[in-house]
């Protein structure tokens, strides 16, 4: 992601990335864009992480700012390239999270921060419930690389843990 193409926001992200404890109107501007992205994109949280230590620099959820996320897969993988991670650290499918991360590249062609967005699985379920163009079954499911449901509505119950296979 190269925010320099978006003018003021790119400069604001660079300012936040350069600060150990960002605050003031620049961070408020970044938070506003993160919140706008959260609402319009069906996410539960959108945040920027320090590339070095994984600290949350700015977030659509201010309570998360200052937290250290250094051991999370979206930090390790998100430093190098866009990454999708399904978080199974919670005990129920309704609490699972799908995290999207990507490095934000600065003027020196190096990552300055990591952008992370946590998907709202109910939003994804509603989106996938649109049946137009889905063939004879009219069903679509989100599964991980182990063929297990990621969906919040289908990943629970007695069949929630079984692998799912499809011909499509």
Image (cartoon, rainbow, N blue to C red):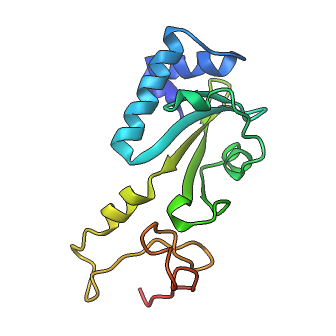
- Give the x, y percent position of residue 94: 50, 63
Percent of width and height locating residue 20:
72, 17
Q: How many marks?
A: 0
Check the image and report above or below for 71 versus 59.
below
Q: Toward the viewer: 57 or 2?
A: 57
Reply above or below: 89 against 104. Answer: below
Tell me: residue 36, above or below residue 135: above
Left or right, 40 with reference to 59? left
Q: Quadrant of residue 112?
A: top right
Horizontal arrangement in the rendering, residue 16 relative to residue 9 (left or right): right
Q: What residue is shown at x 50% (from left), y 74% (from top)?
A: 156
Q: Is residue 48 left or right of residue 151?
A: right
**Vertical relation: 76 (above or below) 154:** above
Q: Residue at x 61, y 19 (%)?
A: 16
Relative to 30, is 103 on the left or the right? right
Question: At which x and y percent is residue 100?
Answer: 55, 50
Q: Residue furthest left?
A: 132
Which of the pair 68/134 is nearer the observer? 68
The quadrant of the image that shows the N terminus is top right
Most foreground residue, 33 or 93: 93
Q: Position of residue 39 (x, y in %)?
A: 36, 39
Q: Residue at x 29, y 87 (%)?
A: 137
Q: Point out the residue furthest to the top here.
A: 24
């Amino acid at each position: 992601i190269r925010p320099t193409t978006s003018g003021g926001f790119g400069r604001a992200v660079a300012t936040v990335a350069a600060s150990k404890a960002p605050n003031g109107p620049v961070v408020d501007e970044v938070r506003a864009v993160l919140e706008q992205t959260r609402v319009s994109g069906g996410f539960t949280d959108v945040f920027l992480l320090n590339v070095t230590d994984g600290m949350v620099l700015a977030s659509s959820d201010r309570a998360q700012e200052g937290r250290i996320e250094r051991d999370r897969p979206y930090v390790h993988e998100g430093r190098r390239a866009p990454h999708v991670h399904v978080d199974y650290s919670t005990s129920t499918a309704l609490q699972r999270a799908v995290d999207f991360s990507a490095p934000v590249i600065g003027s020196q062609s190096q990552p300055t921060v990591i952008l992370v967005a946590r998907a709202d699985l109910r939003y994804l379920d509603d989106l996938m419930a649109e049946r137009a163009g889905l063939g004879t079954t009219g069903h679509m499911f989100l599964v991980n690389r182990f063929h297990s449901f990621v969906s919040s509505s289908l990943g629970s119950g007695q069949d929630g843990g079984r692998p799912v296979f499809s011909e499509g």
